[in-house]
Image: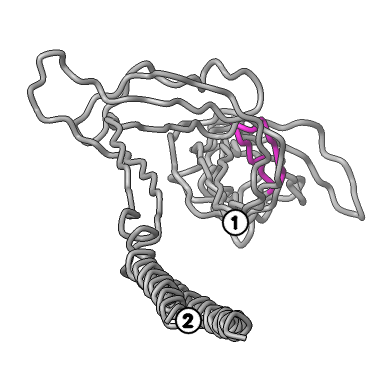
Amino acid sequence: MIRICRLTKLSMTTNKFIINTVFFIFLSLITGPVLSYGAEESIEIRKSIRSDDVLTVESPAFVGSPKEYAPLETVMKEGKKYHLTNSEILDIFTVEKTEYSESSILYEGVEYIDRMPETAWVQIINEDLKLKQTVELPVVSQVEECFYWDYDFTFPIEVSGCQEDTYLLGDRDIPNGVPLIDYAEEFLKYLNLPGDYYQITSIVWTGEPVERNGDMVRNAQARGKKLVKNIRAVYGGEVTVPSVKAQIYRGIYEEDRPENQTDPLIYKNREIAAYERQAWNGYRKIVRYIITITITLTVLLLLLIVILILHKKKKAESESESDSQLD
């Protein structure tokens, strides 16, 4: 009777321990993920910062004094007024580039018989970079700026056969001894010069007759005026500008806002700080939950095996002790 009572008490104690253990493990299995994940959320903090419109203006690249490139105190853009809040000078290297450039040459006193050159060596100047280049470019346009009479028009005349009754001017016989100015138009025709552009005002002898190759010749000098013009020729084409060390002026502007402005503020810049916790949703959280269950079940199984082994051992010791008492 004592044996039965002791075995029953031991069995009840062991069974209670097993039940409590299983309940505890099951409770851990159920509530563990809840405790681990249920309170964990994805927290996102959003911080909005009010920002007025900001405008950045950069000057052309320049070499030399920056004074003339300094940014203005106020600028207008798209109907908005901006005021300068900060400015700085930055050192840079310009990028080599090929661009169209032009340069002009003024030709003065161009007369009828002159022909304008089709190409010319001109100097291309970049004022900002203080860069001068001499290049050959083709003419792209010509502009006649003005017309005027040039009274420095002279040309020599040589008369042969001056001791004869007549002498030839081209195919025209001129009587010997008559004033040469009377034949001014014939002289222009002989030289193929149009009367609209050239006029002879005087012809004078410049020496006495001399013999030359068995013939008597005499020299004269014609004077007059010629209609000339000033022509400005523009030469242009593609010119490669090399890379040089230069500077730029950068100005930072903010939009002017009247003090009594009632429009709602515009929040443009937004900073987001996300603190990510593991929640139930999501593939990664599901995988972690499955792993947790697997580990928990494995631990439960091992614990049950240990409990059964201990239970059998305790039972065997109790039976052995009971047998000894009976004996």
Give the quarter of the image for residue 270: top left
Q: Amino acid at mark 1?
A: Glu
Q: Is residue 80 above or below residue 282?
A: above
Mark 1 against mark 2, which lies toward the viewer?
2
Image position, residue 257 (x, y; %): 20, 20
Along the viewing direction, whichever of 313 and 93 lies nearer the viewer:
313
The stretch of residues the image draws in magenta is 121-134
Along the viewing direction, whichever of 240 and 36 lies nearer the viewer:
36
Image position, residue 286 (x, y; %): 38, 75
Dot 2: element: helix
Dot 1: element: strand
Q: Is residue 289 visible?
A: no
N-terminal of the pair, mark 1 or mark 2, is: 2
Give the quarter of the image for residue 223: top right
Q: Confirm or deny contact between disc 1 and disc 2 (CB under 8 A).
A: no
Q: Is residue 260 above or below residue 199?
A: above
Q: Residues within 10 Å of mark 1 (few under 14, many from 20)?
A: few
**Colour logic:** one colour
Along the viewing direction, whichever of 97 and 150 lies nearer the viewer:
97
Instruction: Kindly identify which numbered label has been placed on residue 71.
Output: none
Q: Read off the residue under disc 1.
A: 238
Q: Within the magenta stretch, is there residue 66?
A: no
Q: Residue at x 63, y 82 (%)?
A: 324
Q: Residue at x 40, y 49 (%)?
A: 275
* Prevailing secondary structure of the magenta residues: strand
Instruction: Kindly identify which numbered label has been placed on residue 3.
Output: 2
Image position, residue 112 (x, y; %): 53, 48
Quadrant the N terminus occupies: bottom left
The residues tagged by marks 1 and 2 sit, at their Cα atoms, a distance apart of: 117 Å
